[in-house]
Amino acid sequence: MRHRIAQARAGLEHYEDRLLSFIAKGSEVVPERVRPRLVVVQPDSEDELLFRYARLHWSIPVSAGYGRRLRFLVYDEYNGKLIGLFGLGDPVFSLGPRDRWIGWDAKQKRTRLQCVMDLFVLGAVPPYSQLLCGKLVALLATSLEVQQAFRRKYHGKRSFIRRKALDGRLALLTTTSALGRSSLYNRLKYRGQPVFQSVGFTQGSGEFHFSNGFYEELREFAVKHCDATAKHLRWGKGFRNKRELLRKVLPLLGLSRELVYHGVLREIFVAPLASNTTAFLRGEHRRLRRYNRTADDLFAWFRERWLLPRAARDDAYRAFDPATYRLWRSS
């Protein structure tokens, strides 16, 4: 993360004082008056700067997403401060545990994968994170408002490669834990019904262990010495993904391709957004029977189940100072 913070400095340091004004002091948070507001992040906006800034505080490097992207901030209307954020991006085509859970074949997947999105980043910022608001953000990601925002952005749009009209219906969210098992998604329920379901673990491969500028150096080497592997000119002239680049460049450096395996198994979760999600994704049902959980409904549940009990048990959040959230020297 140090390298990513250094890379982002030129574009964000000038705005840091302003961005820090959206991070609450502990004394500014009144649990009984918290009222979340979902905001879709627009390009070249202050919301986008805040999204990028907050994302830099994650403990491990976070993807910026790719392909279709839809980003959200969650504000507290009571004080105008940031509660958390999440981002939706295109899912990977092949994900064994997810595919086995759905039960679809390759043809069904090519047709309906467009109705699946991956949560590439999700979480709460302090002091709200100390009040378990990561769970609130996860719940809000499954809300009717998010599905409607997805439809507004993508219904009828043409896919980038095949130029096919997109469906615009969001049936499933997927995500993976940061490291190992997840305390955020496990046992997260709405009125007794699981919201996220664990379907297995990754194989422990990826690129996040090539950090602090090392991956960028490998990429520069690959551009000079390896053949690009993008399958379509519309994708550009580079490599299909980071893992493909690593598999190409590591042997040229006398290193094993097996170094892409870091051994950290990440738990895979699915969040169905309808009672017939799997049947819909297999093409067996034409109509999607949504759960229709609104943001207000989800927050009302979270407030009574987690927020107020946590605030009554532990008031450590009151001591939080936004100055500790600063990344660079005072602007």
Image: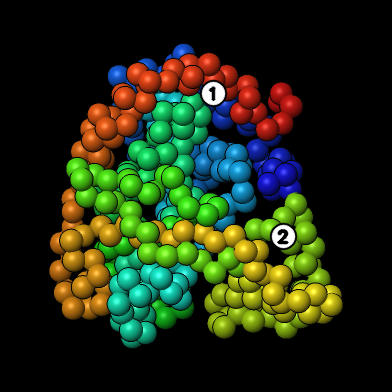
Residue hosting label 1: 21
| Secondary structure found at label 2 | loop
Query: How packed is label 2: few (under 14 Cα within 10 Å), some, or many (20 or more)?
Result: some
- Residue drawn at the location 59% of the way across and 60% of the way down: 264
As shown in the figure, which amino acid type bears the numbered disc 2? Phe
Residue 111: quarter of image? bottom left
User: Where is 14 relative to 254, above or below?
Assistant: above
- Residue drawn at the location 40% of the way across and 33% of the way down: 132
Tag 1 and tag 2, C-beta contact below 8 Å: no
Viewed as shown, does residue 88 lie left or right of 63? left
User: Where is 157 relative to 130, above or below?
Assistant: below
As shown in the figure, which amino acid type bears the numbered disc 1? Ser
Viewed as shown, does residue 331 lie left or right of 103? right
Residue 206: quarter of image? bottom right
Viewed as shown, does residue 266 lie left or right of 100? right
Q: Nearer the viewer, residue 23 or 314?
A: 314
Query: Which quadrant of the figure contains the C terminus?
Result: top right
Nearer-N-terminus badge (1/2): 1
Residue hosting label 2: 210
Residue 200: % across, % down: 42, 65
| Secondary structure found at label 1 | loop
Residue 330: quarter of image? top right
Mark-to-mark CA distance, 1 and 2: 33 Å
User: Where is 266 relative to 188, above or below?
Assistant: below
